[in-house]
Structure formats: C-alpha cells, structure tokens
Image (spheres, coloured by chain):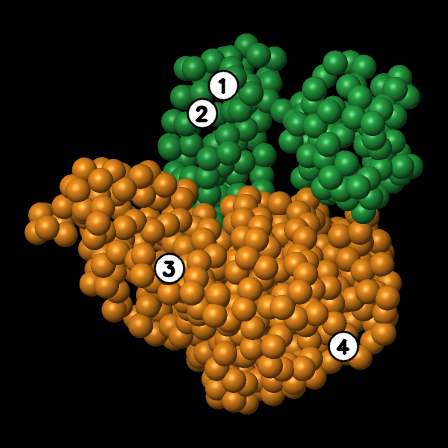
Amino acid sequence: MAEIQQKSPGAEKGEAHPSGDNRFKMLDASMKRQRFQPDALIEVLHTAQELFGYLQDDILLYVAHGLKLPPSRVYGVATFYHFFTFTPKCAHTCVVCMGTACYVKGAETLLATVRECAARENQDSGGNGKFISVETARCLGACGLAPVVVFDGEVRGTVEPATAEGWMKGWLKHGPG
Amino acid sequence: MDLVELQEIGEKELAARKPIRIRVCTAAGCLSSGAHDVQKRLEEAVEHANLGATVQVCAVGCMKLCCEGPLVQLDPEGSLYERVSPDQAPSIVTGLNGGAVTARRGDPGRPFFARQKPIVLEYSGEIEPERIESYIAAGGYRSLYEVVREMNPAEVIDAVTKSGLRGRGGAGYPTGLKWGMVAKNQGHHKYVVCNADEGDLGAFMDRSVLESDPHRVLEGMAIAAYAVGAELGYIYVRGEYPLAIRRLETGIRQARRLGLLGTQIFESPFNFRVDLRIGAGAFVCGEETALIASIEGRRGTPRPRPPYPAGSGLWGNPTLINNVETFANIPVIIRNGPDWFAAIGTEKSKGTKVFALAGKIRNTGLVEVPMGTTLREIVETIGGGAPDGGKIKAVQTGGPSGGCIPAEALDTPVDYDSLVHLGSIMGSGGMIVMDQTTNMVDVAKFFMEFCMDESCGKCIPCRAGTVQLYRLLARISERKATADDLARLESLCEMVKLTSLCGLGQSAPNPVLSTLRYFPNEYQALLRDDARAPSPAT
C-alpha cells in the first residue's frame, strides 16, 4: 500500500505507474487536467472510482500524493459522500429508489422482494454471495415513473415485484459478468 | 460573434428545418421507458419511406407528461402519441401518408397541458437540447446580447429587482436584492454558482430543465455574471443525473465554440467561463455554505451565516448562488421586460413555478403554473386526481424540509407565504400526492430517517436530535409509545428546529410537525392501549 504511494511522483512527468496498470496513467491525466489543484479532489475521486470500480486505500493515498493533500483529508472527503464506495462491486447491481414518490407507490415491498430474490440468486450462483448487490438510492429524479429500479445502470419505471424478479433471474441464466 | 451572426445561425437553422417534424421526448423519464429505441425506429422508418426531404425526427427535451411516456408529437399538425413502443413507432411515419397508426393517440388539449403556463419550460419539448442552433433559432442568447451590449450592470439588477423574481430554490429570497449585494461587495474575484444539487425527494424540475434546455440556464448565468461582475461560474450538479451532466457539458462546449461563453463575449470586455462540479451524493450540499465547501473540494458541511456567500463565499470571495429555475427565468425577464413578468403571479410571489407532480395521482410529470394557482387546480384539474377512484388525503411539498398539506386546505393558492402559513414550504417544487392508503406517521418516519442519514454531523441538535426523533417515531409506529412520548416528540421538534445550524436541521421536524398538526388522530391511534390519555405527570 505505502509502497505504491512512494513510487507515484512520476505523475507530473507522465511516467508509467510501476505496477504497469494503465488506469493509473488515466488517473494522472485527470489530475493533470485539473492542474493538481486540491479543490479538484472530488472530481479526481469520481474519476478514480470510475476507473477502479471502488476506492482502495492505496488509490486514496495515490490521489493524496498527487494533489499534495494529507491522506486524512482525502479519506475524510471520500467517506463523507455516499457516492464513493470502498468495497468491490458485485457482478450485477440493483438499485431500488427510495424517494418519496416511489415510497408512496410501494417501494418498500419492492425492496423486500428484490432483497429476497438477490439472496436466493446469490446462493444459487455459488459466487460467495457476490453475484447481485442490492442498493437503495435517495430519489433518482424519475418520480413520474415511480417505483423506479436501476438494473445494471438501466433505469426502469413502474416496476412490479414480478418484473424485478424476472430481471434478476435473467442475470443468473447468463452467468456472472 | 455579433448580433448579425447570431441571427444568421438562427435563420440557417430555421431554413434547414423540414416541413414535418416528429419530436420524441428524450428526457430521463421517457428514455427509461424506451424513447431511444422509438427514436431509432422512427428514423429508420423515415429513411425507409423515402421521406427524408420532408420529415425529420428531433430528439427534444421533456414533454412534461412523464406517466404516459415515451411521448411523440408531430409538428406542425400537433398530434400527440403516448406510450409509444418501438414496434408502434414506424406506423406514425406511415400514418403521414394515410396509413393506420397503431400508437395510442393522446389529447394535446387536455387540462394537463391547457392549464399550464410555460415560461421556464417554454422550449422544453420543443427544441433539441443537444444542439445550440436549436436554442438560438428559438431566440436564445438574444437576451445576453442585449444585456452585454446595451445595458449596464446596474440596469440589469434593476430589471431583475423590478420583476419581483424570488429564489426558486425554496427560501424565496428576492433575486434582485441578492444580485445587488454581490455586485456591491468588493473582492479579488467574484463567482456565480448555479445550485443544481436537487436532493429533495420527489423533485425533478431542475433535472428536466437541465436536460431539456441547458442553454437557457447558461444564458441566465452569463447575464447574472455580467450584472454582478463575475468572470467564473460553477454549476454544481447531482451525480445522480448523468444525462443532465452530459447535456450541460455539450452545451458549455458549444457555447464556448461560438464565443457565447469565454472571453470577450459579443465583442465586449465581458469574459465568463463556466465549469461543472459533480456532486457525490450528499443532500446537505444543497445548503449554500455546504455547497461552497464541496466546490472547494472539502467535506460538504455548512458553516454559520453571516457572513453570507454574497459577501464571503467561494475562497472567501463574493459569490452569487441561485437555483437552476431562478437562472432559467432570467433570459425571459430581459426579453419581455420586468413589467411583463411582474404581472404574472400574486402580490408577493411573481411569475410561475414549476412543480414535479408525482405519487398517487393520475397524471404525473412536470407542471408549470402561475404563482397563486390553487393546489386543487394543480392536483385535481391538471393532475387528474387520485387514480382508481382513490381519495386524496394530503399533498406533500418541499420534500424532507416541507410538510403535508391536508385535503381540506387544497383551495389555498400556492405561493411562498401561504405554504409557510400551512406549515409547509414551497421548497424547490416537489409535490407528492398521498391517498387514503398512506399512513402519515410512516411518512413522517420516512422523512426523519432520511434527515438522520443525511445530517452532516457538524451540529449536535441535528446530529443527535434527528436520531432521537426517528426513535420516537419508530416507537409510535410499533405501538409502543405513550402520550408522554408524543409530548416529547413535539418539544424535541421545536428544539431541533430552533437550534440547528443550517436549513437541513431547522426544517427536518417540518414533516413531523405538519402531520401532528393535521393528522393527530393517526398518532393517537397508534399509542399504547393503556396510554391514550396524557399522564398526570405531563
């Protein structure tokens, strides 16, 4: 962890990351575009999460080093915002909107069904429970179509529990990924 | 860029327009019902029928009636088609030559459309949001030209003040007054910030405006920047709105390319640059001082005011912060004059307001009405009332900071002051309708859970108070509470309201207080059987 951080000063010169991982090069480019300004921290963390899927400690240290910020500050900001995650994502995600409109239209029952179904699928897929993750969102702004569920980035409106189950069963047929 | 060039772009766009336009709504709502495939099939059908010379398919912004999407409308004839599936789409094209159209026909004259007064949404669903030429052809950036070339900053502020426009973010602070303060304050730099962190549950007006007419917001920001003397602007958008972000990025790029943003705009000494800042999911960042902290790359925690951002905002400089809808009103105020704007609405609330209508209601979508329209008109006439023979029980406005207005008060005209009087707030414009199946204690608990999660933790009344309030509400809904608990709930609400640092905490008790006020029976009915009457100790 600390080792990676020590070897990162190549960022400004555009040298490749010692691990050979090209994503670091892209992260460097994003920091460079922001002229390594500390106020660009949130933008850089967005890019980092997009590239790596989640924010590992070493990535946070790498960003801290690049923007010349204390690691505590980077960690503090990253953990403050809900958008950033620190654990690897499952193969599929199912985000149930829990905004008011969705709530009024029965999102709670829907969420229970989705959770139950995900637990079943996770067991069936044999992927150590890492197949489908169920998350909730605070209003996706598609209230006109409540209740709303996002299946792997695809927003679907007026979702019935049965439709949600259908989607998730479809994933199992195609296997993980 | 000068006026002649601007007009040329508009004329060229109009000349290139085909006699028949098929407009497809491509805002987030319709896209999630498959509008993209509908658009593709329409384009294929046009090509297949060899109608390319006379017919064009346009991807436009929100057409307002979200529940019937994807929506397709024909110009100039005006036919509206609802819930168009990709398979039905080609029949709309063959229908132009007299074929049978299988898509369901909607009535563009229904009250949902006819009773609205679009000002902010005037081009929404008409123009193509991803093409600046489309906005210019509709008359866009003409107001910016007039301001930069023919008015001095004081005149602009005067016009905005005279229009009576009040902030559309919720609090309703007079916009002209705020602009005047920022203009007067001295600073090394000045900034203009557009608050597009629409975190209120059940609100999607700002998303729709940004997705449907992004240039209108950019133009409004540029006019504001000229008036207050700023050279740099930020738009702080929610990370949950990827489409709005993409369209804003496109919009900024196009405006810069044409010299409508950047240096020496309209060959004047006025420079203005706009940058995007993407939020990362924190409701509290809608509060202006927290938003500033977030733009500066820090944790989004608010700080005490004063000093107000108008005096000391971004990096300690004077900063003007307005909501998306406020900026979207500016170009039209300049174009039609402040008197025209001031003639719309009520005595103290001028202009129109966009509401996001959702929940247990027949017509869900975007509604723009003059201030002072009654809730009944919005909910029953425009919204079509509760579906399936249900009865409207309450209308929730203002999201987690607002309150529930009971059905008995539906005849109240909607403006900033009357809603506060009812114990709710205008908020940014979310309006959720609830019917008899909705339990009001559960609703209060739902909002309190939200505030508890979203409290930033800086001040104790909000951090600890929301947790205690949530526990009390949970006790009540589990039928474990006594009358003492109910009294404690009420007094704790007052305490959190009076002592919290920022708007989040100060307004967090509103949903509880308003439901306690209008639906006390529902709380009483959930008390423990042996504890209905208040104990002598209280």
Pointer 4 residue: B183
Q: Is residue B379 left or right of residue B532?
A: left
Measured from the top left, where is residue B16 in percent x and y? 32, 57
Pointer 1 residue: A121
Which chain hosts label 4?
B
Q: Is residue A83 left or right of residue A142?
A: right
| Chain letter, green | A
Q: Is residue B154 above or below residue B489?
A: below
The residues bearing labels 3 and 4 have C-alpha atoms spaced at a distance of 37 Å
| Chain letter, orange | B
Q: Which of the marked residues, 3 or 4, is nearer the chain's N terminus? A: 3
Q: Residue at x 42, y 32 (%)?
A: A164
Which chain hosts label 3?
B
Measured from the top left, where is residue B462 in percent x and y? 78, 57
Pointer 3 residue: B13
**Image mark for residue A168:** 2
**Image mark for residue A130:** none
For the residue carrying disc 4, how many other residues have a C-alpha within 10 Å: few (<14), some (14-19), or many (20+)? many
Instruction: Determine whether the residue tagged by mark 2 lies in a helix, strand or loop.
Output: helix
For the N terminus of chain B, the quadrant is bottom right
Residue B43 in sight: yes
Measured from the top left, where is residue B64 in percent x and y? 39, 60
